[in-house]
Image (cartoon, helix red, strand yellow):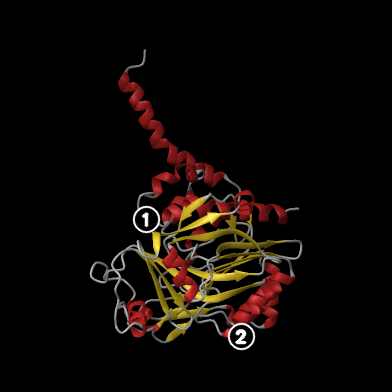
Amino acid sequence: MFSIKRVLTAILLIIVLIPLWMWFAWLLTPKKKMVAAIIDKTVLTSKGQEHVSFSWLLNNNRFAKTQSKLYHAGHDYFGFFPKAEYQYELKGLERFSLENLDQLSDDADLTYFTDTYGIYKNEWYTSEQSTERSGLVYGGMSKRDVDFLQLMKDKHKLILSEFNTIGSPTPDNIRAKFETMFGMRWSGWTARYFPVLDTVKDKELPLWLINNYKRDHQGKWPFHKAGIAFVSSSDKVVILEEDIHLSDAMTYIRSREAGKANLDLPDLTKYPFWFDIIVPDKRINTIAANFEINTTSMGRQELKRNGIPTEIPAVIYHKGTDYQFYYFSGDFCDNPVSMTSSYFKGIDFFSALFYNSDNKEDRSGFFWRFYYPMMDKVLSEYYSSLKK
């Protein structure tokens, strides 16, 4: 008979070996070439935080940029490249000729615009928070970007984009081209959940947000509880506070049947970060999920008074023989995930170990419950279609 000590030793050995087995399984999985043109103009460090979630998916699935080389979050993208001593290098599509863009659209299987917000002087040259938005160093969607998107669309390639692709500081004429191209428009509003609106309790509340609200309300900021801030393209700020305008301050994403059936989305997910409010042409795009804001009657009146739509799409898509397009209205690709975990096959089975479901601000849970299954489905299906 086995002694209890031997049984415990065997169990411990299995637990220790599981990660090693998972790593070997990942290492032995064949690489799959799928060329992704990632555009990220908001890169403050070499970690590439604004596109790290997508890099994680590519690596975990062994999608490679060549037959042998996997993607690296720090350098396999187009946009802003930080260097030491406040130096940087610009490697966006703006430097491409039309001939180069055409070649890139031939070579690339897909493109993902993860962030075009850009880099501002106060962020790049100092670490201090500013009461005013400082001058732009680099950012905004450019004419070359939309030229490239048109080529990708014409060649029936997969196009992924998300929050702030066409928001500030993108010029109005460039935004209009994108909106016409993909059957959607930005309402001019962005929003975010804040767990505490009390300026004494939370010293990291954006000062520009507070000052812009005070500017229009006789210098007052009367908020103390959790809430949602809405910001317009003209810097107008509208605040909905818990227990007054909101029965629950947390922002949720409620999936529709199309999202659950076609994108493996969960029914309901917490989303505690920035998102924009878009209006899709429903004749062209399918709404897969909506942001759910639990307003009181006062909250609904406040939204109506300020012309803020009450239906707020979180995920829309167009999947036809002409082209494939997805727009994610949140900052979905920016999640605190470690690239280290992407080197283990089947790591999603242990996903509950990587986030705290009780922490309202934990975006890791959003990655594992929402972004991972959705993007895993999109990428695997698209790769299969390339092989036909």
| For residue 161, side relative to residue 366 (left or right) | right
Residue wearing tag 1? 360
Identify the secondary structure beneath mark 1.
Answer: loop
Vertical placement of residue 193 versus 377, above or below: below
Q: Is residue 187 left or right of residue 225?
A: right
Q: What residue is at 74 percent from the left and 71 percent from the top? A: 154
- The front one of 250 and 247 is 247
First in sequence: mark 2 vs mark 1? 2
In the rendered image, residue 353, in percent from the top left (x then y), is placed at: 39, 45
Q: Position of residue 87 (x, y in %)?
A: 40, 81
**The N terminus - image quarter:** top left
Q: Residue 268: x, y in percent?
A: 50, 51
Single out the residue that lies furthest toward the top: 1
To which residue does mark 2 refer? Answer: 173
**Which SS class for mark 2?**
helix
Q: Nearer the viewer, residue 262 or 45?
A: 262
What distance separates the C-alpha of mark 2 from that of mark 1?
Answer: 38 Å
* Identity of the residue furthest to the bottom in this view: 135
Residue 146, compared with residue 253, is above or below; it is below
Q: Is residue 362 left or right of residue 103?
A: left
Q: Can residue 205 be seen from the camera position used here?
A: yes
Of the pair 231 and 159, the residue shown nearer to us: 231
* Quadrant position of residue 96: bottom right
Name the residue rendered at 67%, 71% in the picture: 183
Q: Residues within 10 Å of mark 1 (few under 14, many from 20)?
A: some
Any part of residue 62 in sight: no
Q: Amino acid at mark 2?
A: Asn
* Mark 2 in CB contact with mark 1 (< 8 angstroms): no
Percent coordinates x, y for residue 253 in the rendering: 50, 57
Counting labels gives 2
Q: Which label number is shown at residue 122?
A: none
